[in-house]
Image (cartoon, rainbow, N blue to C red):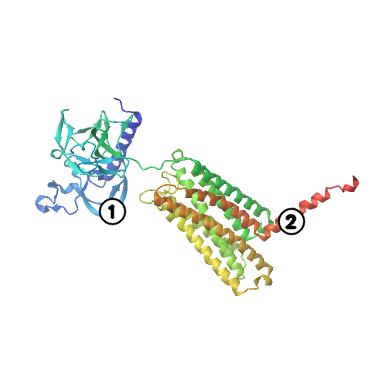
Amino acid sequence: MRISLATAQFVMIGCLLAMTQGIHEEARHPCAFIDTVNITGSYNMGSSLNNSYVHNWTVIPRELVTAYDFIIENGIRVPAKRHLRACICKLRPCVRFCCPAGQFYDLEERSCLAAQQQLPPPPDQSHMAVQLHNGTQLDIELRSLFSVYEETPCDHMKPYTKDNTYLNWTLHENGSIIHRDYLFSKHYCFSPLLIGNSSWSWQPLACAPEKLRFVLGVREWTYAVCLLICIISMFIVLIVHLLCSDMRNSFYGVAIKSYTTCVIFGYALLAHLTLHDPANLSTAACRIIPSFALLFLVLSFYILSFIAFKLYVSFNGVVFTKPMFWLIFGPIVLIAVAWSVFVGFSYHGSRLVFGGDTCWFDPRNWSIMIYFFAPVFVACAISCFFYVLTLIRISDDPDIDAEKSFESLEKNRLKSFWKFFTYTALTWFVCVCSFAFNHYREERSHLNYAVCLCTALHGFAALYALIGKNQQIQNFLRRIEENNDEDTCENSVPMSLY
């Protein structure tokens, strides 16, 4: 029976990763982590035996013992409390079992279970067929030749199969596991697996990579379409503010145009990430694209905070100048750029925040709450703070509209802006709730469709609040309509001529 090319590549990749990890660790430690055992609390023989240790009646030389400040979980290096570990597998070859005696590793439940009563009992793990150096195979008591341990190197273990058939791996006297000319990874554990309903087979299980499967279904296409609807709506808002001279030349109009530009680019990049398989993107693209998406989206919220601040100081009689505008707006942009660069090079749980299975925040951890939703929450809190101060200022002077037409215009901007801000905050609140709910259930739910709907409503809210409820924009549109009516009257012919 020939092993398939895919299986061979899988075995070789696993072995190469294990060797690479071992070489990296042995540069500072006597051996790879998988070949060690925690001996904290073991007896030290003192100077009489060169400070050797005794663990499970085995004398371990001092040169094979060192302090570790990390552990390996699911193939990832995780910081841990400093402890002593010994290279026990250098003294005697190691054999690892996934479960205690009488149990087996269930591939679906990913845990050790006892065999059902109607099934034959699992084989005894004290003996196993071992191939000696001279080529003969004998059923040998394992503890006479090996150091035997019970542990699973990873949470998810899987066997190697060919055509849904288990391979015949052979345990050798030196601890290696070989099928024909293929060497099994050291990150393994033995478990009896049921063949049919009548017999068990000892199989080495390897760590299965925990990767998110890319799915492009109805939910993803719906989200992309809703993002497109919002992008079109924001583009209309941007064009109208560019055409309206009163808004185009005001600092408020510049801020709104900057906001819509950020949302357009941010949502476009999110749509690109939603519709493209991360496997088809380069490593650089998988980090640069989400970093820019994060930049535009976070910056958009801090532009809203800037607008809230601008409205507050306007009601206090402060007139913005160009140096004042750029002195405040410029650092906001620089902070957003610095934050996106920081996140792009940051690690969360020994993994890069970007550049993983999704080219976006990993939904299996809380990185999106820390690096995305937390800055958004801070920006919303700042906006609400200035909104409250503005309301207090207006309440102190109830006749503010009758005093100055400028302040009446600012009050109209305040109302339209805060209507839009409320819709925006509601949209992202639904996103946060959807993520928290999906993270708790460890699967996607139909609440994702609510996120899609709110994303589309975000664009409609911009049309309604920033155009429909803005007095300057409405006056501009009325003037266009009146000019069109005048042109129509000039080009018309009286009916009396006919």
CA–CA distance in space, label 1 to label 2:
69 Å
Vertical position of residue 407 compared to residue 213: above or below? below
Q: Amino acid at mark 2?
A: Arg
Of discs 1 and 2, which sits in the foreground?
Answer: 2
Residue 479's label in the rendered image is: 2
Q: Residues within 10 Å of mark 1 (few under 14, many from 20)?
A: few
Do callouts 1 and 2 mark residues in contact (Cβ within 8 Å)?
no
Q: Residue furthest front?
A: 118
**What kind of element bears circle 2?**
helix
Q: Which residue is mark 1?
A: 80
Question: Looking at the picture, how far across and down is residue 154, in whole percent?
Answer: 30, 44
Left or right of 237, for residue 478: right
Front position in the image: 229 or 19: 229
Q: Residue furthest left?
A: 48
| Occupied quadrant, residue 318 | bottom right
Vertical position of residue 365 compared to residue 181: above or below? below
Front position in the image: 238 or 414: 414
Precedes in sequence: disc 1 or disc 2: 1
Q: Residues within 10 Å of mark 2 (few under 14, many from 20)?
A: few
Question: Looking at the picture, how far across and down is residue 240, in whole percent?
Answer: 66, 53
